[in-house]
């Protein structure tokens, strides 16, 4: 089992920044990467970004490219999502997910991000 705990969400004005953290514990060695997803009210959960534990590969949704940066600290088993130039449409619950064989298998409880206009 892998446990994931997100933190760092909150309320920010449009144009502002937030940094989310995802702390992983348990059998993290069984996972190959960690990603972020988000779900806005009335919408389906969508992919945001993903990074391999090696840090060699990163992936982003088109909607966040150039604004969000995913990074990891392997020694701390922690993945970060730096979100800049936030927009009201970025408002959602953000979830961290650990991948096995390139599929999200474990999920955190989510953290709320609200961007006011």
Image (cartoon, helix red, strand yellow):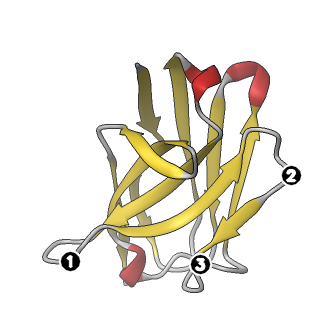
Mark 2 packing: few (<14 Cα in 10 Å), some, or many (20+)?
A: few
The quadrant in which residue 12 appears is bottom left
Q: Which residue is mark 1?
A: 43
Residue 28, horizontal then vertical, whole percent = 58, 23
Looking at this view, name the residue that lies furthest to the top: 26
Per the model, the C-alpha gap separating discs 2 and 1 is 31 Å
| Residue 34 placement, left or right of 71 | left
Residue 94 marker: none
Residue 78, horizontal then vertical, whole percent = 64, 31
Q: Secondary structure at mark 3?
A: loop
Q: Mark 3 or mark 1, which has the lower sequence index?
A: 1
Q: Mark 2 or mark 3, which has the lower sequence index?
A: 2
Q: Which residue is mark 3?
A: 64
Quadrant where the N terminus is found in the figure: top left
The quadrant in which residue 106 appears is top left
Q: Mark 2 or mark 1, which has the lower sequence index?
A: 1
Q: Which residue is mark 2?
A: 56
């Amino acid at each position: 089992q892998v446990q994931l705990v997100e933190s760092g969400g909150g309320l920010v004005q449009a144009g502002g920044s937030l940094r989310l953290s995802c702390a992983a514990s348990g059998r993290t060695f069984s996972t190959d990467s960690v990603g972020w997803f988000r779900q806005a009210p009335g919408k389906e959960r969508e992919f945001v970004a993903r990074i391999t534990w090696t840090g060699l590969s990163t992936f982003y949704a088109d909607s966040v490219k150039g604004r969000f940066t995913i990074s990891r600290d392997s020694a701390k088993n922690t993945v970060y999502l730096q979100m800049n130039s936030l927009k009201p449409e970025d408002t959602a619950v953000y979830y961290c997910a650990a991948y096995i064989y390139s599929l999200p298998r474990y999920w955190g409880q989510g953290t709320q991000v609200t961007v006011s206009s």
